[in-house]
Amino acid sequence: MAVAAGKAARVASRLRGGGSALPGLVAERVDPAFLTHALADLPHGIVVVTGTNGKTTTTKMLVAILRQHGRKVFTNPTGSNFTRGVISSMLGELKLSGRLETDMAVLELDEAHALKFAAAVKPTHSLLLNVARDQLDRFAEIDQTAKLLAQLAEQTTTGVVLNVNDSFVSRIAGHVPAGVKVAYFGVDPSIADRLPELQEADVRFEDDFAPPAATATDGLLKPKDDRTFEVRFGDAADGADNVGPLELKQRGLAAMINATAAATTAKLLLGNDFRADRAVTALETVTPPFGRGEVIDADGQPLELVLVKNPAGFTVALGTYGSTPVTTMVAINDNYADGRDVSWLYDVSFESLRDKGVALTSGVRAYDMALRLKYDDVAVAEVQPDLDLALKRFLTAYKDEPKRIFCTYTAMMTLRRDLAARYGLANFGEDAQP
């Protein structure tokens, strides 16, 4: 009954133009134990990917690697990372029996909803990416987010993958139950000086955490240049399991780190079946998830759509995408899914935008963003809070120029839907969460 009700809601939701989470809510109301029933007895387990930044991209990369190895993988591709969103994604693949017929599940989950998921279905593996200030009205300070990730690790039954360069995440090793494998991913020491822009400054730990010596399942990112890198595994003296050199379609150090996390997790999951050449093939073909550096052909000119949602993420985005001056729009909302508190914008330096300035600010906090840019001496040509009007103005007034939009989550979803309608792009559910 729950499957039938959910499928009916899914059809109705699509007819009205969106709503990736509504069908899951309907199914869950009919059967509160829906997740437990649908995910029972998957032969190769259930992987939860969570953390502040990089969940969607890393999940997509991990799924691509596993599928390249012949695994049949269920995932939640819309980015709806609440439990009801996971159920909604399942409904398209479930038969009326209510069982998911797949080898394994790889699920992106919001930091808080990962625990709600684990209360219903214990993950066999968890990939814990990082901790940063994000949606302070929901998560309070970073200590609270780190606590959520530690609690997820405590409920994981087979293996946990941790970011060795994030002081909050690496210390979660002490919370992993006995008998559960711990693997680490991170960057080669030669580029450690590039990490501060990617993570929170951390001065609160008196002890220096030292992870164990690298093993065959610990992956380190070693860049060759700005676009090419490889993932090296600890005790593989012959380099047989090293992944790369390779080049991603998505730019920047953050994307390389996400790829390292995905490759490390895949190696832990696949064991002796892991093949480096298949991982390379998978990673090189992965396209950026919508809004995460996605490039859209807008009337013959490239338009980059870049999600920003916290100081670390915006700083990385400016460093990665802002290095080449193009016509820029910044769209800031403060809806629930964005986080109500946007004071974090004052922890971001916008000096890199001075030379060309910003063509438009938009969204609920359009004027707040314009004021913030003024403090960094960045000229703003126009302020238009209405996203639809702002996008129309941006596309027409600057039709013959390369363009870029930095946007918070709900602003990105609105803009992406408008762009999909205008340019015939694939669309995504309106209730997905960041």
Image (cartoon, rainbow, N blue to C red):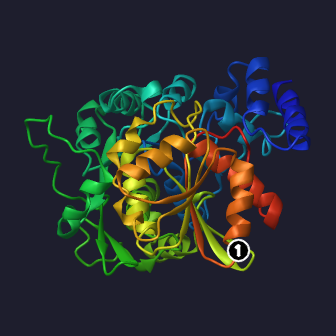
> Which residue is more in the foreground, 149 or 324?
324
The quarter of the rendered structure image containing the C terminus is top right
Question: Residue 384's x, y, as percent?
Answer: 64, 49
Q: Quadrant of residue 353?
A: bottom left
Check the image and report above or below for 132 versus 121.
below
Which residue is found at the position 8% from the left and 38% from the top? 207
Amino acid beneath label 1? Lys
In this view, the residue in front, 266 or 127, is 127
Instruction: Where is residue 401? Give x, y as percent.
Output: 62, 77
Q: Is residue 382 left or right of residue 279?
A: right
- Observer able to see residue 152: yes
Residue under the image location 30 percent in, 34 percent down:
176
| Image height of 148 relative to 388, above or below | above
Where disc 1 sits, the SS reads loop
**Nearer the observer, 273 or 260:** 260
Residue 396 left/right relative to 207:
right
Q: Which residue is mark 1?
A: 399
Q: Position of residue 211 (x, y in %)?
A: 17, 48
Point out the image quarter for the N terminus.
top right
Q: Is residue 75 visible?
A: no
Quadrant in the rendering for residue 156: top left
Kindly indicate the quadrant of the structure image that contains residue 267: bottom left
In the depicted view, which residue is nearer to us: 347 or 244? 347
In the drawing, does residue 89 fall left or right of residue 139? Answer: right
